Amino acid sequence: MFPAGVSEVRTRTVTVRDGLRLRLAESGASDAPPVLLLHGWGASIYMWRDWLAPLAAMGYRAMAVDLPGHGLSDKPEDDAIYHLAPLMQVMRGLLDVERLQRVDVIAQSMAGTIALELALAGEQRIGRLALVNPACFGVVPLLRITPLLHSGLVGRLMPYLLTRGSVARAHRLVYGDPSRITSHDVDQYWAPSQFPAYSRALWRLAIHFEWARQPADLMARRLAALPHPVQVVLGGRDRLVRDSRPYVEALVRYGAPLEVGLIATGGHAVNEEYPREVLDLVMATG
């Protein structure tokens, strides 16, 4: 699993709260300004493979973490950890353990919701905030089947349903151009599924995470209270979080302080599909 064999990226395990262990990958000098990279549902630090070394070369301490339930981080069987508020606490714990007084955050999809809610809750250690196809700005069509997922039988069957083929089909949905996905990419996304608790964690998140978006006028008022504008990068071919662009346009009309970028041919994981282009967008004001 990434970053095996990549000399410029180092990994370690950090314990953040109640014994919860997270895998952390980083590149760059330990005393350089930190940038924290947070992946979305079903991903891992592999999503940021093409970001770590370039950020380090730009003079930053690039940090990427496997969120609870993902990658090689712990995968608790307790439903409670997979709600929004506990995941926010996990991120606070990471900032505490790493003694980060100020950190820029780039967060994709589900993690965009976590990071934004942290900032809106007054977490002053977050500096610049960039959201890539944040789940809280769109509608997630796949969640229409959420009522069906509440069956405990589904949870028990998840390890058998998450085959390499199903992972490959799901991965094709997150790119605007699926032909860019390699067999190695599929293997990296499939690898965590060898832990049965991984699929159950994804199931719990689908049920318990706060996926619904707020009315645009309410969100705009909340955003207006932030000390810095929020950067938003959207993929024009996002098939997993729909209708984000009109929602963002409504936020701007209501006066929300947003800086918006669009990669027209990018999908939901546009930061992975077009790493250099998105990196240039979010670091342009650095």
Image: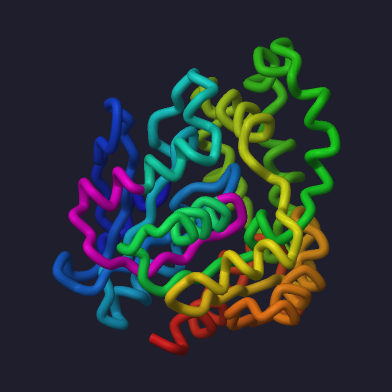
Q: Position of residue 16 (x, y in %)?
A: 28, 38
Q: Quadrant of the N terminus?
A: top left
Q: Going 39% across and 36% down the picture, which residue do you hit?
A: 73
Tell me the magenta residue range. 92-110
| Residue 272 visible from this viewpoint | yes
Q: Is residue 90 above or below residue 224?
A: above
Asked if residue 151 lies left or right of residue 159, the reply is: right
* Magenta stretch encompasses residue 95: yes
Q: Position of residue 215 (x, y in %)?
A: 75, 59
Q: Is residue 76 above or below residue 46?
A: above
Residue at far left of view: 31
> What is the quadrant of residue 235 in the picture?
bottom right
Q: Is residue 101 above or below residue 280?
A: above
Residue at far bottom of view: 285
Q: Position of residue 50 (x, y in %)?
A: 46, 68
Q: Is residue 179 above or below residue 73?
A: below
- Front residue of 184/28: it is 28
- Front residue of 6/264: it is 264
Q: Going 43% across and 75% down the picture, which residue do you hit?
A: 227
| Residue 177 visible from this viewpoint | no
